[in-house]
Each structure stands twice: as structure tokens, then as C-alpha cells.
Image: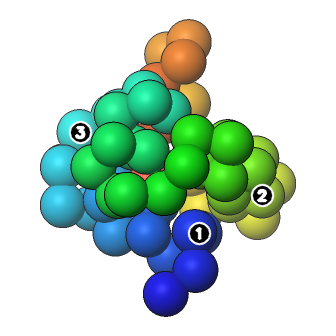
Amino acid sequence: MDANEKVIQTLKSAGKPMKTGEIAEASGVEKKEVEKAIKKLIAEGKLHSPKRCFYDIKK
């Protein structure tokens, strides 16, 4: 499972918006990798930021 999949899975499990550090801790992925994955997933339209520094799955 790559970083993108882990980020999505972590957010699905949480069921709420999370900060980058929280996603990294919960998924076991380095924060830098989580940040890269978030940028990519936002560009692909899979994630969004409901408020500053928080990320969630786009519904």
C-alpha cells in the first residue's frame, strides 16, 4: 500500500478531518510523505481542506 492509499484509508477510518501530523502518526507514514500525498490527492480531486491545515475525503 503506498502513501496515497494509506492517507485515504486513515481519513476513512477517522471519519473526520485531520491535520497532517495526525495522519502521519495514525498511518505510520513520514510527515513529508503525507504532505506529498495530500498535495497529489487534492490535485486529483480526492481530498479537500474544510478548514486551514485540516484535510478530509471529498464526498
Element marked by disc 1: helix
Against 33, is 52 above or below? above
Residue 16: quarter of image: top left
Residue drawn where x is 34% and y is 34% of the image:
22
Residue that carries the numbered disc 2 in the rendered image: 40
Q: CA distance from mark 3 to mark 1?
A: 17 Å
Against 53, is 4 above or below? below
Q: Is residue 47 left or right of residue 14?
A: right
Residue drawn where x is 48% and y is 57% of the image:
29
The answer to whether mark 2 and mark 1 are in CB contact below 8 A is yes
Residue that carries the numbered disc 3 in the rendered image: 16
Pick whichever of labels 3 and 2 is earlier in the sequence: 3
Image location of residue 54, percent across then percent down: 46, 25
Element marked by disc 3: loop
Image location of residue 58, percent across then percent down: 49, 53
Residue 48: quarter of image: top right
